[in-house]
Image: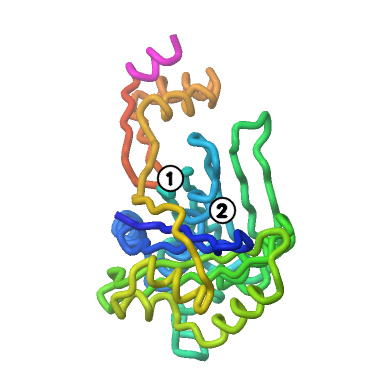
Amino acid sequence: MGKIVRYITEDGSAFVIAADTTDIVSRAERIHKTSAVNTAALGRLLTAASMMGDMLKGKDDSITLRINGGGPAGSVIAVADSSGNARGYVQNPIVEIPLNDKGKLDVKGTVGTNGYLYVMKDIGLKEPYVGQTQIVSGEIAEDITNYFAVSEQTPSVCALGVLVNPDLSVAAAGGFIIQLLPGCPDEIIDKIEYSMQDIEAVTVMLSNGMTPDDIAKRAMKNIAIEKLDESEAFYKCNCSKERVEQALLSSGREALQEMIDSGEDTEVNCHFCDKKYIFTPKDIKNLLA
């Protein structure tokens, strides 16, 4: 279970959302059996998606983040609903590359920097909103900050972190996003900038026992803030046999007939939770009917 909290300044000029997504990222690592650096990459994107999903207004709204910078990981994808429940996967789950020059997992190296971050919001309109911004760092947090600035014209700060144990399990994962609202006074902006100068890494704060509430207050140090809400979030996949049947039907009559003629079972795996759905030739024949 993850936890997400939201606070706003007393004057309503800025807000912060903070999350502990350790359980969500742990679940993703167990499902996809990712290498350490890809656990960090996928975990950061899942954390961003979870917080950005929680920022959506409609009950049935959802958000999809996809980043591909031409690195060995390929596409990294995360999807979240408006409760912050997230799911995701990485195209090439196992990538082994050296640590970066700071001795940390090289997320930039596995994601790459020659490509784009895509943000798709399904908010109940006829067509989903799609934003696209060029990758600026490949470290993901900076790319999310750039997306908000370029596509939504919202000055923001995003921090994300995933700490991976030597046995590849997840020790800690989380993040925070600060956004300035229209009319934010210079005094608040200066205090946020000052707070960001010496703030600890998210994983350090989590490892020291800080909660999302503590992280939100630390990020907004010396600023009066009020709590808006808190919620629980999970790694949650919405796949089902019915959805897979619809996907098979969309492949067309000819493709379905080929499955029947093969005389073999058709296996469909969910990218997000790795659940297997088996359809016998008789099942496919019923679909075709």
Horizontally, is 54 left or right of 213 in the view?
A: right
Please provide percent x and percent y for residue 28. Answer: 35, 57
- Identify which residue is drawn at 74% across, 61% down: 150
Does residue 247 show up magenta in the picture? Answer: no
Foreground: disc 2 or disc 1: 1
On screen, 47 above or below 163? above
- Which of 77/253 is in front? 77
Give the image quarter of residue 197.
Answer: bottom right
- Tell me what residue is drawn at x 34 percent, y 74 percent: 206
Query: Which residue in the protein does label 1 denote?
Result: 83
**Quadrant of the drawing holding the C terminus:** top left
Residue pictured at 44% horizontal, 72% vertical: 217
Residue 56 occupies quadrant: top right
Residue type for callout 1: Ser
Q: Which residues are magenta?
A: 282-289
What secondary structure characterizes most of the magenta part? Answer: helix
283 relative to 220, above or below: above
Residue at the image position 39 percent from the left and 41 percent from the top: 270
Comparing 232 with 260, the one in front is 232
Query: Residue 148: where, in percent of width, then height?
Result: 67, 60
Give the percent coordinates (x, y) of residue 72. Answer: 53, 68
Q: Which one is in front, 156 or 266?
A: 156
The amino acid on which the numbered mark 2 sits, given as a three-letter code, is: Leu
For label 1, the crowd category at 10 Å Cα-Cα, with few meaning under 14, some 14 to 19 and many 20 or more, is many
Residue found at the far left of this picture: 167
Q: Would you call the spot at circle 2 few (<14 residues within 10 Å), some (14-19), or many (20 or more)?
A: many
Q: Quadrant of residue 42?
A: bottom left
Q: Which residue is mark 2?
A: 65
Please identify the quadrant where the N terminus is shown.
bottom left
